[in-house]
Amino acid sequence: MKYILSKHRGFTAALFAALCSALFALGLCFFAPQSARAEEGGDAVDLSAAVVTVTGGDFGDEATRGKDKFYYTGSPVTPVVTVTLDGKEISNITEVYRVEITNGTEVGTATVTVTGILPYYKGSATGTFEIMPVELTKAVITLKGGTAATATEFFHTGEEIIPTVLVEINGKALDSSKYDVVFSDNVAKGTATATVTGKNGYTGAMVAKFTIVDKATNAWIVPPSLSGWRWKAFDPETNKISAEARYGTDTAVFRIFDTEKMPLTYGEGFEGVNGDKTAFMLDNGEMPDEVKTRLASLEIGKYYIFANIAKGDKYTKLGEDVLPADDDFFSHGYMFEVSKSENSWLRMPSIVAWTWGDFKKSVNIIAAVPKYADVTTKICYGIYISPDYSGAEYVNGLKEFYTVNGVSGEVDNATAIKLSELPAGTYYLRATTNDSQAEYGALDTFVQFTVQKMQNHWVSTPNVAEWTWSEYNPEINTITADPTYPKAGTNITFGIYVDEYCSRRAEGITDFNEVDEDVSRALSAMPAGNYWLKAATNDNSKNYTDLETIVPFTVHKIRNYWTSTPNVVQWNYNSFNINVNTFSAVPAFRNIDSVVTFGLFTDRDGEHKVAGLDSFTEVTADMAEILNKLPAGQYWLRAVTDDRSENYYDLTTSVPFSIMPANNVWEASPYVISWKYGEYSKDFNKVYALPKYGTAEFSIFTEQTCAADSAIAFDETYQGNNKKFVLDENGLVPDYVANKLSSLGKGSYYLLAVCAGANNYTELNLENSVPVPFEIQAVQNGWADVPSLVGWSEGNFDEKVNIFVGSARHGDTRFGIYDSGDNLLFIVWTKGGEAFSVTRSNGEKVTMNELNTLAVGSYKLTAEVEGTDNYSALSAETTFAVFEDSVGLNGIIAAVVTFAVLDVVAAAVCITLIIIRRKKVEAQFRNMVRKELGRR
């Protein structure tokens, strides 16, 4: 195509250019001059000589209808307008002229003006048509408003009677402005007239009459009647008297006469009407029971019903209460007839049909019951091949026979044998009655019946002993079927199909009568699936049906199984080894591409999968990481095959396995560094243990058995337990534990470190408590301050100045004051370096002021600390002096001796004081001693 276009491109372009030029020129020629012609009308055709013809009129007879005369309608007339010029009709399809109609609505002459439209035509031409008035002879005049019997019957009032007048033409009411109504003779009783005269488009006049009466004229709206019936077939629900008058229907009196002009009577007890026992009235439309009984017994013939209604205050009588005896008698009544009854069957002739070969005279009875019969009535039966009254088609030997017990019952034995021999087919039972009476006729009826084909059935239903794929055995998996007919053996045709409609055969298997080697081979090769066995007989017997049955059977899929059950080599938490903890499963049946898909779930039903492990065929490194971190617990390994084989089932098996908790161990075994009493340091005497999993919890016991009552209690709790603690974030004991450990005395202790088990790891040291023993050793006690006492001048002991110095590292110091004869004078008890109690040698408690009783002199001071299990005892001995109130040489010397023990500088100061010997110096000396002691 591209080649052709390129080949003719020059020609095509030239042709297109020429065409465009031509169209442009044509447009110039057509459109440009038009406006000029439209303005000048130069070339427009003049319509002045045109002939305007009007057609389509509906006025007149067949000769004039369709021309230029139209009936007045009250609406503008739209005629068919035709314009011809020089004998040729001008079409107005393209609107070359306009049509205007004047005076086209009212009666008279209307004008049609045709005006040319430039540039086609100019000028104008006219035509006319007639609008004719409508004759009122076409109208229907209806008077309404009658006050008496009818719409046109009025009661006399002495004044003008003005009925309502309705004028209709073609079923449409005419407006009252289109006619005038004049009434005459409309006051006195008699016939009055309404004259309707047309106007405003309508012409002519019509007359309607109405009557003015004293009483309304009664008449039958529904004349009296009684529907006839057949002899003995009167039905009071159907054969009812119908009668309705304008007035007094409920007072109507009825009489019934026979053709001999004799009235029917209704028994001695019937009262009749006003003593007339031949007359009766209706009660809500129902005849008296005596009348119904009499009518039911009427013989065949004609009868006449008469009815009359007596006059009332407002209406005339209706019917004759005294009937004439002339020949006109029956004209006053209404005839009904009791006709001859056609006999019929109360029970239609019938024979209980049977199946070929199964006639039983006690079961297959023949019956018929005529409606009318007497004691002589007998019913004759015959069996015919067709309903032919000539009798030529009867069955031999069964043309005429009777039942043993009359109208209904069994046939005799001979007839029963012949009936049992009838082949299957359609027959006709003929039943005739042998009597014919005046009241009813004889009956002769054919009734079709069928000796049905024996419905053949399977004595042994078609069956296939099913098998599992690959396990077909012709000796076991047999195909069988056994029909009831024929009694002798028959060939059964089998076919195997892959659909229930038996439209597609199983591959390689055609119809067969027995399973030979070829069929057996084909059956064993059939894939697993659903199949349909069609078994059929083909005897084409008249008396029994052939059989064709389709039964489904299945070559079952073989149930697959695991030759190696799905398994996973279990592991401990955080110990998965991709090369050791392998997944395996081997199905018995599989194809070349078969794989087993594994999935891990936390439930047997596979509703809760393990993320990242719900579907895999082999374990990748990423999966191994997930498996390694799986929490300890029970899991389900689901192994699935997805071969979707038609011959064997896929497998889905879930097996439980466990990830055992990891065996927890001490990465750092529990230990504690022993210490001496009072020298505990949590940074040095560390308590420590580090489990591989979890957190170590510590307790300290005083007994190796770690009995609960031997546990050390702390001032604070851990998880609500004040006998247990854990290390802080720095791996050290908390301060409250350190404080407690510092206070523990000498002895053997036992540190128990445990780690509670969790889902993923086992407990450590929880069940089998193995404590770590440690010792708090006794410490060698020593003086923190050398025992001493600052002497004082006689009578000037000041407990704030003359302080008992002598604090031990451990324990409280007891001081003893002895005189020069080594007699114990006072015992001073201290606690925490403060004196708190003073007793004499005899145990008498005194105050510290009693020391002022000491006379001037030198005294021995002993300091003792009692030893305990935790520290050793201490003792020291020194002297102090009580000097004179004026500092004498001996006092100063004693003081110097005392201070010499404390400080050489202090001794030099004392020597200076000896030289000065003044009270002021003594006071300064005392202050200096206080300061020095405070510094110490």
Image (spheres, rainbow, N blue to C red):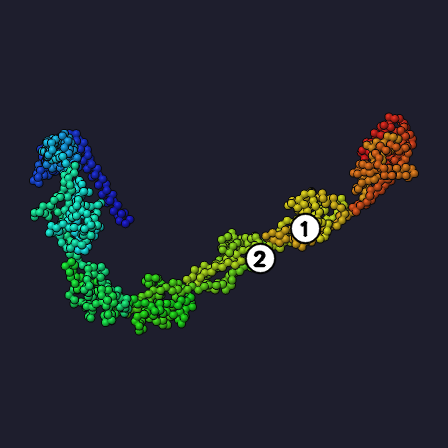
Mark 2 or 1, nearer chain start: 2
Q: Which residue is mark 1?
A: 753
- Disc 1 residue type (three-letter): Ala
Q: Which mark is residue 896?
A: none
Name the residue rendered at 51%, 51% in the picture.
Answer: 611
- Disc 2 residue type (three-letter): Trp
Q: Mark 2 near mark 1, Cβ–Cβ under 8 Å?
A: no
Where does residue 893 sit, x and y in percent of width and height?
90, 33
Where does residue 727 sit, x and y in percent of width and height?
66, 46
Residue 327 in the figure: left or right of residue 659: left
Q: Secondary structure at mark 1?
A: strand
Where does residue 607 sit, x and y in percent of width and height?
49, 53
Q: Which residue is mark 2?
A: 571
662 vs 210, nearest the viewer? 210
Where does residue 549 sit, x and y in percent of width and height?
33, 65
Residue 349 in the figure: left or right of residue 189: right
Q: Secondary structure at mark 2?
A: strand
Snapshot quadrant of residue 192: top left
